Image: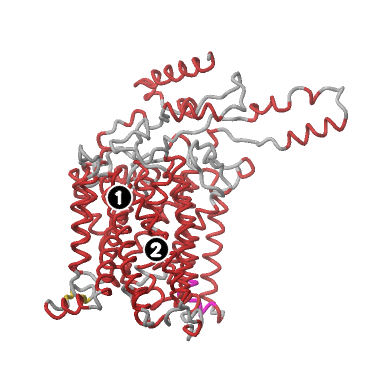
Amino acid sequence: MTEKGSLWWKITRRKTLDTDVLQTPLRRCLTTIDLTLFGVSQMAASVFMLTGIAMRNKAGPGATLSYLFAGVAALLSALCYAEFGARVPKAGSAYSYTYVVIGEFLAFIIGWNVILEYLIGAAASGRSIGGAVDQIFGGRIHNWTETNIGVWSLGIAETSPDFIAFFVILITCLIIAILGTRESVSMNNVFGVANILIVLFTGILAYCFADTTKYTDGFLPYGFPGVIAGSATLFYAYIGFDAISIISEEAIDPNDSVPRSSVFSVILVTGLNIFTTGGLSLLLPYYALSESATFANAFERRGISWAALLVGVLSIFALTSNLIATLFALPRTVYSMSSDGLFFVIFSRISERTQTPTISIVVFGLIAAILSLLVSLEALADLVSIGTLVAYTFVAGAVIVLRYAPTTSHSFAMKPEQLEEDYAPVLGDAATEESLSDKEKSKLLQRKDKIPQRYSYADFGKLKRYFCDVPVISGAGPGKMATLATVLMGMFMFAWSGVVIYSKDYLLEGVWWSVCLFIFTTLGLVGCYSVLIMHVQNDAFLTFTMPLVPLLPALSMWVNIAMMMYLSWMTWLRLAIWGVVGMVIYFAYGIHHSAENRHIPKYERLVSISKELEAAAVDDSHRISPEKQQPTSAHAHLSDVSDSQAEDGTDDVTDSLNKENSEKKTS
C-alpha cells in the first residue's frame, strides 16, 4: 500500500468530487441548442483553415474521405466525452476526466496539452482571418509587410508577421471578457447558424462551377496512406465537441445536453465538410490550391472574381466565429487547473460582474495573439492535431478504466442496486402451481430465462463467474487487471500501428521479422481485450453511458493512435518540448499547491449523491418493490469503509442516509 504523502501517492491521487457535482461558481445558463451551435461554430469554419493544406500536401481530392474518417473517429471520441461530460460537468474536459479517474500528474499533462491545442487553434484562426483579409486586397498587405518589415525566422518556420491576426485576437478577447458568458454565447449562436449557411453556400457555389477534368491525377494521388495522413491533420476540424465538454459546467442540464449536442454537432459538421470539400476538389487541381484563403483563392484563379470576394468576406465571418468559440473554451481549461491548485491560482479568479475567468481570457488570448503574429499557418497546423489526439485517446481509455473500477474507487451517482431476487415478483408463485397447463408453465420458464442475471455492486471490476479460476489474472484486486489491460492495450496499439504503417512493404513481401512483430502485437491486442471482457462491468451509472464498452472506446483509442503515427517526428518533438515545460511547472508549483493537499481522505470512499440525482435514482427504480429495494450505492459503499473511518464519522452519514430511506418508505 502506497504511503500517503509520498511522491507516488501525490502524482497518482485522484480528484475528490464535491457533494453536489452540479454546484459551480460559474453561471449555468446554456441549453442543448446553445451547446450544439457552440460546437458547430467552432467546427464548421475549420473547413476554411486546413482543407487547403490537407488537399495540397497529403490527400488530394481524397480529403473528402479524410473528413469522413476523421468524423467517424471524432464521433467515437464524442461519445466518450459525452459520458464524462454528463457525469463530471466541470470546466476542463479531458483534464477533469483524467483527474477524477486516473490521477493527478497524468491529468496535468493532458490539461497542458489541451491548453496547447486551444492556443494553437486560436492562433491558426487568427492567421486564417489575416490570410482571408489579405486575399480580398489582392495580397497587398502581405507584400507590404514582407517588403518593409521582412521575413522572420524563429527556428520554426520563416514567415512575415501578421498584424491583422494579432489585433483580431486581442479585440476578440476583450469582447469576450467584457460581455461575459450569456452574452458571448448569444452572439456565438448567431455565428453558429451563419456558419452552417456560409459553409453550405460555399459548397453549392463550388459545385456550380465544377469541372471534373480537375482530377488530373485521379481521386487518390497520395494513395490510401495519404487519406489517413489527411485525417490526422483535419481531425482538428472536430475539436468543437471537446469545447462542448469544457463549457459543460455552465450547462443547465449537462446529463441531457452534453451527449445530444456532442453527437448532433459532429454529424452535422461532417456532412458539411464532405460536401464543401468535394466542391473545392472540382474547382482547381489539388496541387494548385493555396494553403491560405483556399476557397477564395480557388475562385479567383478560376476567374470568378465576384465569387472570390463574396466567399472571402463570408469566410472571415465564419473564422471569427471559430476564434470566438476557441477563445471562449481556452481560459476555462486554465481556470479548472488553477482552481485545483495545479496551475497559478491567479487564473482561477472569476469576475463578479460577468462570472467569467477574465484574467485567463486576457493573458492566454495575448499569448495566442503573439503566436499568430510570429508563426506561419503551416507550422501551426502541424501542431494542431497532436495534442487533441493524445487527449482523446486518454479519455477513451479512462472510460474503459472507470467501467471496470470497483465502486469504492469513485464517487459517481448510480442507480439503486438490483439483484436477482428483485425480479421474483415478475414470475410470482404461480409457476410452481400444479394447476397450470404445460403451455403456461413453458411461457413462464421462457420469461424467467429472459430475466438478467445481475451481479452485485461488490462484483464490479472482478472476474466473471466463468473466469474465476483463470491463472495469473485471478489473484488481482478488483479493477487492477482491467486497468493494466487497458494500458497494455494502448501500448500494443502503438506498436501494431507502427508495424503496419512503417514496415508495410516488408509485411507484403513476407519478411520474417515484420510478420513476427505483426503476429505478436496482434495477439497482444486480442489478449488485452479478452482480459477486459472477462471482468464484470459497471452498468449502473445514473448518467449517460457510452454503448458497447469496451469495444467502441477501444476502437476510438486505436483510430486516434493510428492517426498520430502519421504525424511528423518534428510534431512529436515540439509536443515533447511543451510537455517538458509543463512538467517543470507541475513539479515546481502544482504538486505543492494541489487542492488535494488540503483534502482529508476520511470520506474518500463514500459516494456523495446530490438530492436531485438521488431523487432521480428512486424514480428510475419503479420496477423494484419498496419492501425489496436494495440500498443505493451510497449505502452499499458504507460497508466497505474501514473501521477507523467509521469511528471518525461514518456512523453519522449512515444514520442520515437510513433516516432519508425510512422517510421515503413511509411516504
Q: Name the disc covering residue 108, or none.
A: 1
Residue 53 visible from this viewpoint: no
Q: Nearer the viewer, residue 314 or 627?
A: 314
Q: What amino acid type should be assigned to the residue bearing mark 1?
A: Phe
Q: Name the disc covering residue 441, or none.
A: none
Total marks placed: 2
Counting from the top left corner in percent of width and height, residue 184 is at 29, 48
Q: Which residues are magenta?
A: 499-507
Counting from the top left corner in percent of width and height, residue 411 is at 42, 34
Which residue is identified by label 2? 198
* Left or right, 54 with reference to 400: left
Q: Main secondary structure of the magenta part?
A: helix
Q: What amino acid type should be assigned to the residue bearing mark 2?
A: Ile
Q: Nearer the viewer, residue 88 or 268?
A: 268
The residue carrying pointer 2 sits among few (fewer than 14), some (14 to 19) or many (20 or more) residues within 10 Å by Cα, namely many
**428 w.r.t. 197: above or below:** above
Alpha carbon distance from label 2 to label 1: 38 Å
